[in-house]
Image (cartoon, helix red, strand yellow):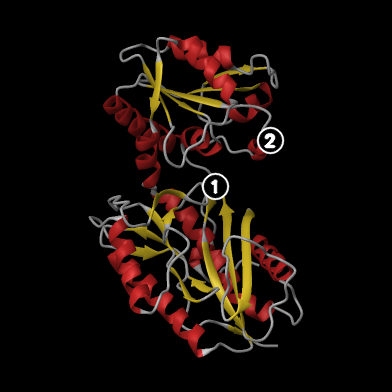
Amino acid sequence: MTDQSDPHLFPPERGFPESEFSERTQRMQTAMRALEVDGLLLTTEAEIRYFSGFHTQFFESPTRPWFLVVPANDQPIALIPEIGASGMAATWIEDIRTWSSPRPEDDGVSLLANTLKELPQRFGRIGLPMGQETLLRMPVTDYRSLADKVRPIEFIDAAGPMHQLRFIKSKREIEKIRYVCQLTSAAFTNLPSAIQTGQTERDICRSLRIDLLRRGADSCPYIVAGSGPGGYDSIIMGPTDRIPFAGDILIIDTGTTFDGYFCDFDRNFAFESLSDLSRKAHEVVHRATDAGFAAARPGATTTDVWLAMWSVLEAGGALGNSVGRMGHGLGMQLTEWPSVRAGDDTPLVPGAVLTLEPGMTFAPGQQLVHEENIVITEEGAEYLTVRAPLEMPVVKN
């Protein structure tokens, strides 16, 4: 049951008003003028939902392509399979063009090409996210056909403006992320008392997932776990049928959602006892998180945050970090641009939501990772998750 004594656990209103989508579109159109494109073509679930509010699980099916075109000076145009017409009609989008799909011989390609050619032509270019952390959700052969049909119009990369736009969350977006972070924090706090002797990693994660759904989460598409004596050697696999024993440490990392927005953080649990070496390593990653939090403020960069965390890890005896980064953007997707890593250099601004994820190998085959979710404010940063305790919880049966 949801703990109604905590005001953070009252769910925010679902969806967004039309004004929010209109503002997003206008901000994108400003960026499009700077990029010198006549329109923007979007093909992925998150991009289409961001501008339209069209929220469906049907994107799990890879059969049909879906398109949204943002003109330089008008409302977005949806070009979608007929099966989605009624759903799109419930959004703020007025111009909805459909075709019968699946139709492999021409699955919306001609309709899309004609729409792009009808746009007022000033620059002869269409923006399409092509760069880092983007994908094209249509057959490559269809994209080639589309490029041929619209010549001499050319496609150019619009990943940069999309990244910048989605990096800064609105107050309503932040409240959805805060809510799912808070309810997930409550479930993690409750978990040690729910674990039974002899349960596998899979059993424990199943119990956590059920608790998350009871507390108000919509889904738990990402729950991974790993365990081992004093630490673990992977943070992306599992859960498995391994049973944690005395002296083991279990990590669970979850991306749980509410109204299409993710949390993404982990918690570590010791079983029966915690060795001095593991206790020290946990304190180091915890202090590294504090250092990253202190460094995360407007005007700083993702590199500054990374350096603040790595300096604590290195001083604490880290043998290395195999993850490749120590945090990332968060929102409609489990991981979003940018990466908190050396050399990323993305400036932090109010409204940006990030994960802080310092991790270190502290002994051969043993690592500890800690993760929290934060939002950048005018003054610095604020935790969206409930901060984990310095002392790792110990499960005793």
Label 2 or label 1, whichever comes before in sequence order: 1
Q: Is residue 35 left or right of residue 389?
A: left
Give the distance between the C-alpha atoms of the residues marked 2 and 1, in whole angstroms.
Answer: 24 Å
Q: Position of residue 304 (x, y in %)?
A: 28, 61
Which residue type does callout 2 highlight? Answer: Ser
Residue placed under numbered mark 1 in the picture: 14
Q: Position of residue 256 (x, y in %)?
A: 58, 57
Q: Is residue 296 visible?
A: no
Crowding around mark 1 (Cα neighbors within 10 Å: few <14, some 14 to 19, many 20+) is few
Instruction: Provide the secondary structure element on which disc 2 rests.
Output: loop
Crowding around mark 2 (Cα neighbors within 10 Å: few <14, some 14 to 19, many 20+) is few
Which residue type does callout 1 highlight? Answer: Arg
Residue ID at (51%, 83%) = 278
Using the rendered view, name the quadrant where residue 294 is placed.
Answer: bottom left
Residue ID at (55%, 47%) = 260
Q: Residue furthest front?
A: 364
Residue ID at (70%, 88%) = 397
Viewer-proximal residue among 120 and 392: 392
Q: Position of residue 119 (x, y in %)?
A: 41, 13
User: If the image is split into quadrants, where does the N terminus sit?
Assistant: bottom right
Q: Is residue 132 above or below residue 128?
A: below
Q: Is residue 137 above or below residue 177?
A: above
Residue placed under numbered mark 2 in the picture: 61
Viewer-proximal residue among 345 and 1: 345
Instruction: Provide the secondary structure element on which disc 1 rests.
Output: loop
Residue ID at (43%, 32%) = 129
